[in-house]
Amino acid sequence: MSQRQLLLAGSVVPYELQRARRRSIGFIVGASGLTVRAPAWATLATIESALQEKSGWITRKLHDRQLREARESAARILWADGGHLPWLGAALVLRTGERWRAPELRGGELHIGLGSDADAALIRSRVQAWFQHQARTHFAARVAHFAPAMGVAPARLMLTSAATRWGSASSSGTIRLNWRLMHWRPEVIDYVVVHELAHLREMNHGPRFWTIVRGVVPDCQALRRELRSAIAPDWT
Ligand SMILES: [Zn+2]
Protein backbone atom coordinates (compact mmCIF):
# COMPACT_ATOMS: atom_id res chain seq x y z
CA MET A 1 0.00 0.00 0.00
CA SER A 2 1.50 3.34 -0.97
CA GLN A 3 0.45 6.94 -1.48
CA ARG A 4 1.10 8.33 -4.97
CA GLN A 5 -0.09 11.08 -7.17
CA LEU A 6 -0.57 11.70 -10.86
CA LEU A 7 -1.55 14.52 -13.18
CA LEU A 8 -5.00 13.58 -14.48
CA ALA A 9 -6.97 15.82 -16.84
CA GLY A 10 -5.01 18.87 -15.71
CA SER A 11 -5.15 18.36 -11.94
CA VAL A 12 -2.97 16.54 -9.44
CA VAL A 13 -4.86 13.52 -8.16
CA PRO A 14 -3.48 11.68 -5.12
CA TYR A 15 -4.23 7.99 -4.89
CA GLU A 16 -3.50 4.98 -2.78
CA LEU A 17 -1.97 2.03 -4.57
CA GLN A 18 -2.84 -1.39 -3.21
CA ARG A 19 -1.40 -4.60 -4.54
CA ALA A 20 -4.03 -7.29 -4.66
CA ARG A 21 -4.54 -10.80 -5.95
CA ARG A 22 -6.63 -9.92 -8.98
CA ARG A 23 -6.41 -10.08 -12.75
CA SER A 24 -6.98 -6.47 -13.72
CA ILE A 25 -6.43 -2.96 -12.41
CA GLY A 26 -9.42 -1.62 -10.48
CA PHE A 27 -10.39 1.88 -9.32
CA ILE A 28 -12.44 2.84 -6.28
CA VAL A 29 -13.52 6.38 -5.36
CA GLY A 30 -14.49 6.42 -1.68
CA ALA A 31 -14.46 8.64 1.38
CA SER A 32 -10.65 8.70 1.44
CA GLY A 33 -10.33 9.50 -2.26
CA LEU A 34 -9.04 7.34 -5.11
CA THR A 35 -7.76 3.83 -4.47
CA VAL A 36 -6.11 1.80 -7.22
CA ARG A 37 -5.96 -1.96 -6.78
CA ALA A 38 -3.48 -3.64 -9.05
CA PRO A 39 -2.10 -7.14 -9.49
CA ALA A 40 1.53 -7.77 -8.59
CA TRP A 41 2.63 -7.99 -12.24
CA ALA A 42 1.42 -4.49 -13.15
CA THR A 43 4.29 -2.00 -13.42
CA LEU A 44 3.85 1.60 -12.36
CA ALA A 45 3.86 2.63 -16.03
CA THR A 46 1.01 0.21 -16.76
CA ILE A 47 -0.94 1.49 -13.78
CA GLU A 48 -0.42 5.12 -14.76
CA SER A 49 -1.54 4.54 -18.32
CA ALA A 50 -4.63 2.72 -17.03
CA LEU A 51 -5.33 5.76 -14.85
CA GLN A 52 -4.96 8.10 -17.84
CA GLU A 53 -7.33 5.96 -19.84
CA LYS A 54 -9.93 6.16 -17.06
CA SER A 55 -9.25 9.81 -16.22
CA GLY A 56 -12.69 11.04 -17.33
CA TRP A 57 -14.52 8.61 -15.10
CA ILE A 58 -12.16 9.16 -12.15
CA THR A 59 -12.31 12.96 -12.18
CA ARG A 60 -16.11 12.86 -12.53
CA LYS A 61 -16.41 10.49 -9.56
CA LEU A 62 -14.06 12.58 -7.41
CA HIS A 63 -16.02 15.70 -8.29
CA ASP A 64 -19.37 14.06 -7.41
CA ARG A 65 -17.90 12.94 -4.11
CA GLN A 66 -16.70 16.45 -3.25
CA LEU A 67 -20.11 17.92 -4.07
CA ARG A 68 -21.80 15.35 -1.88
CA GLU A 69 -19.46 16.01 1.04
CA ALA A 70 -20.03 19.76 0.73
CA ARG A 71 -23.79 19.23 0.78
CA GLU A 72 -23.58 16.91 3.77
CA SER A 73 -21.52 19.35 5.79
CA ALA A 74 -24.03 22.08 4.89
CA ALA A 75 -26.71 19.76 6.31
CA ARG A 76 -25.12 19.85 9.76
CA ILE A 77 -26.99 22.30 11.92
CA LEU A 78 -25.17 24.54 14.36
CA TRP A 79 -27.46 24.66 17.41
CA ALA A 80 -26.38 28.08 18.55
CA ASP A 81 -27.08 31.75 18.00
CA GLY A 82 -26.46 32.44 14.30
CA GLY A 83 -26.96 28.80 13.22
CA HIS A 84 -28.89 28.15 10.01
CA LEU A 85 -31.87 25.86 9.57
CA PRO A 86 -33.62 25.12 6.27
CA TRP A 87 -37.24 26.18 6.57
CA LEU A 88 -39.78 25.98 3.72
CA GLY A 89 -36.94 25.95 1.20
CA ALA A 90 -35.09 28.98 2.61
CA ALA A 91 -32.59 29.42 5.44
CA LEU A 92 -33.77 30.46 8.86
CA VAL A 93 -31.26 32.02 11.26
CA LEU A 94 -31.45 30.90 14.88
CA ARG A 95 -31.34 33.65 17.48
CA THR A 96 -31.04 33.11 21.19
CA GLY A 97 -31.64 35.90 23.67
CA GLU A 98 -33.56 36.31 26.89
CA ARG A 99 -35.63 39.16 25.50
CA TRP A 100 -37.89 36.66 23.74
CA ARG A 101 -39.94 33.96 25.36
CA ALA A 102 -41.73 31.40 23.18
CA PRO A 103 -40.01 30.74 19.83
CA GLU A 104 -41.17 33.28 17.32
CA LEU A 105 -40.49 33.76 13.62
CA ARG A 106 -39.49 37.30 12.65
CA GLY A 107 -38.33 38.12 9.15
CA GLY A 108 -36.13 35.12 8.45
CA GLU A 109 -35.00 34.71 12.07
CA LEU A 110 -36.28 32.30 14.65
CA HIS A 111 -36.07 33.93 18.06
CA ILE A 112 -35.81 31.06 20.48
CA GLY A 113 -36.16 32.80 23.82
CA LEU A 114 -33.31 31.11 25.64
CA GLY A 115 -30.34 32.77 27.27
CA SER A 116 -27.25 33.16 25.11
CA ASP A 117 -25.54 30.56 27.30
CA ALA A 118 -28.11 27.86 26.44
CA ASP A 119 -26.45 24.64 25.30
CA ALA A 120 -26.94 23.01 21.92
CA ALA A 121 -29.21 20.22 23.23
CA LEU A 122 -31.60 22.68 24.84
CA ILE A 123 -31.72 24.89 21.74
CA ARG A 124 -32.34 21.86 19.54
CA SER A 125 -35.20 20.53 21.67
CA ARG A 126 -36.82 23.99 21.81
CA VAL A 127 -36.53 24.39 18.03
CA GLN A 128 -37.77 20.85 17.42
CA ALA A 129 -40.91 21.43 19.48
CA TRP A 130 -41.58 24.63 17.53
CA PHE A 131 -40.88 22.85 14.22
CA GLN A 132 -43.33 20.06 15.03
CA HIS A 133 -46.00 22.50 16.12
CA GLN A 134 -45.63 24.43 12.85
CA ALA A 135 -45.66 21.18 10.87
CA ARG A 136 -48.94 20.09 12.44
CA THR A 137 -50.61 23.40 11.59
CA HIS A 138 -49.20 23.53 8.05
CA PHE A 139 -50.08 19.91 7.21
CA ALA A 140 -53.62 20.25 8.58
CA ALA A 141 -54.17 23.32 6.39
CA ARG A 142 -52.80 21.61 3.27
CA VAL A 143 -54.84 18.46 3.88
CA ALA A 144 -57.96 20.60 4.34
CA HIS A 145 -57.07 22.39 1.10
CA PHE A 146 -56.61 19.28 -1.08
CA ALA A 147 -58.79 16.55 0.43
CA PRO A 148 -62.27 17.80 -0.61
CA ALA A 149 -61.27 18.29 -4.28
CA MET A 150 -59.72 14.82 -4.30
CA GLY A 151 -62.87 13.28 -2.84
CA VAL A 152 -61.14 11.92 0.25
CA ALA A 153 -61.52 12.53 3.96
CA PRO A 154 -58.64 11.31 6.13
CA ALA A 155 -59.74 9.92 9.48
CA ARG A 156 -56.62 11.14 11.27
CA LEU A 157 -53.50 13.17 10.59
CA MET A 158 -50.38 12.24 12.53
CA LEU A 159 -46.81 13.49 12.64
CA THR A 160 -43.92 11.07 12.24
CA SER A 161 -40.18 11.37 12.64
CA ALA A 162 -39.20 8.31 10.60
CA ALA A 163 -35.63 8.54 9.38
CA THR A 164 -36.30 7.58 5.79
CA ARG A 165 -40.03 7.96 5.09
CA TRP A 166 -41.70 11.27 4.37
CA GLY A 167 -45.24 10.02 4.70
CA SER A 168 -47.61 7.09 4.69
CA ALA A 169 -51.30 6.33 4.50
CA SER A 170 -53.19 3.42 6.02
CA SER A 171 -56.36 1.76 4.79
CA SER A 172 -58.06 2.93 7.99
CA GLY A 173 -57.68 6.49 6.68
CA THR A 174 -54.76 7.65 8.80
CA ILE A 175 -52.28 9.96 7.07
CA ARG A 176 -48.82 10.23 8.58
CA LEU A 177 -46.49 13.04 7.56
CA ASN A 178 -42.92 13.59 8.64
CA TRP A 179 -42.44 16.90 10.49
CA ARG A 180 -39.01 17.28 8.87
CA LEU A 181 -40.81 17.94 5.57
CA MET A 182 -40.99 21.54 6.83
CA HIS A 183 -37.38 21.94 5.64
CA TRP A 184 -38.49 21.80 2.01
CA ARG A 185 -40.25 24.31 -0.17
CA PRO A 186 -44.07 24.36 0.00
CA GLU A 187 -44.46 22.73 -3.45
CA VAL A 188 -42.51 19.68 -2.29
CA ILE A 189 -44.60 19.42 0.88
CA ASP A 190 -47.80 19.71 -1.17
CA TYR A 191 -46.62 16.88 -3.39
CA VAL A 192 -46.18 14.59 -0.36
CA VAL A 193 -49.56 15.62 1.09
CA VAL A 194 -51.29 14.91 -2.23
CA HIS A 195 -49.36 11.64 -2.63
CA GLU A 196 -50.59 10.34 0.72
CA LEU A 197 -54.16 11.59 0.17
CA ALA A 198 -54.19 9.81 -3.20
CA HIS A 199 -53.45 6.56 -1.34
CA LEU A 200 -56.86 6.86 0.32
CA ARG A 201 -58.23 6.15 -3.16
CA GLU A 202 -55.50 3.88 -4.53
CA MET A 203 -53.42 1.88 -2.06
CA ASN A 204 -50.60 1.27 -4.55
CA HIS A 205 -48.32 3.12 -6.94
CA GLY A 206 -50.04 1.98 -10.15
CA PRO A 207 -51.01 4.12 -13.15
CA ARG A 208 -54.39 5.07 -11.63
CA PHE A 209 -52.63 6.32 -8.49
CA TRP A 210 -50.29 8.56 -10.50
CA THR A 211 -53.18 9.89 -12.61
CA ILE A 212 -54.82 11.11 -9.40
CA VAL A 213 -51.60 12.71 -8.12
CA ARG A 214 -50.79 14.32 -11.49
CA GLY A 215 -54.30 15.74 -11.70
CA VAL A 216 -53.58 17.81 -8.59
CA VAL A 217 -49.81 18.28 -8.86
CA PRO A 218 -48.86 18.23 -12.58
CA ASP A 219 -45.09 18.34 -11.93
CA CYS A 220 -45.23 15.57 -9.31
CA GLN A 221 -42.39 13.57 -10.89
CA ALA A 222 -39.96 16.51 -10.78
CA LEU A 223 -40.94 17.23 -7.16
CA ARG A 224 -40.53 13.57 -6.30
CA ARG A 225 -36.98 13.58 -7.75
CA GLU A 226 -36.21 16.80 -5.89
CA LEU A 227 -37.26 15.21 -2.61
CA ARG A 228 -35.28 12.06 -3.31
CA SER A 229 -32.06 13.92 -4.00
CA ALA A 230 -32.47 16.32 -1.07
CA ILE A 231 -30.21 15.72 1.92
CA ALA A 232 -32.18 16.23 5.12
CA PRO A 233 -30.47 18.29 7.82
CA ASP A 234 -29.05 16.29 10.67
CA TRP A 235 -30.99 16.83 13.90
CA THR A 236 -28.58 14.83 16.06
ZN1 LIG B 1 -46.92 6.13 -1.81
Image (cartoon, rainbow, N blue to C red):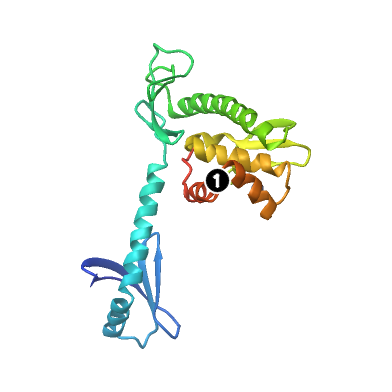
Q: Residue at x 34, y 56 (%)?
A: 66
Residue 197 appears in the figure: yes
Q: Residue at x 37, y 85 (%)?
A: 40
In this rendering, position of residue 215 left or right of residue 18: right
Q: Tell me the quadrant of the picture where the N terminus can be found.
A: bottom left
Q: The residue under label 1 is which amino acid type? A: Pro
Q: How many marks?
A: 1
Q: Nearer the viewer, residue 47 or 151?
A: 151
User: Which residue of the protein is positioned furthest toward the top in this rendering?
Assistant: 99
In this rendering, position of residue 29 left or right of residue 180: left
Residue that carries the numbered disc 1 in the rendered image:
218
Q: Secondary structure at mark 1?
A: loop
Q: Residue at x 55, y 47 (%)?
A: 220
Q: Is mark 1 within 8 Å of ligand 1?
A: no
Estimate how packed mark 1 is, as few (under 14), some (14 to 19) or many (20 or more) residues with alpha carbons within 10 Å: some
Looking at the image, residue 28 lies above or below residue 222: below
Give the percent coordinates (x, y) of residue 169: 70, 41
Residue 236 appears in the figure: no
Q: Nearer the viewer, residue 12 or 16?
A: 12
Q: Residue at x 28, y 77 (%)?
A: 52
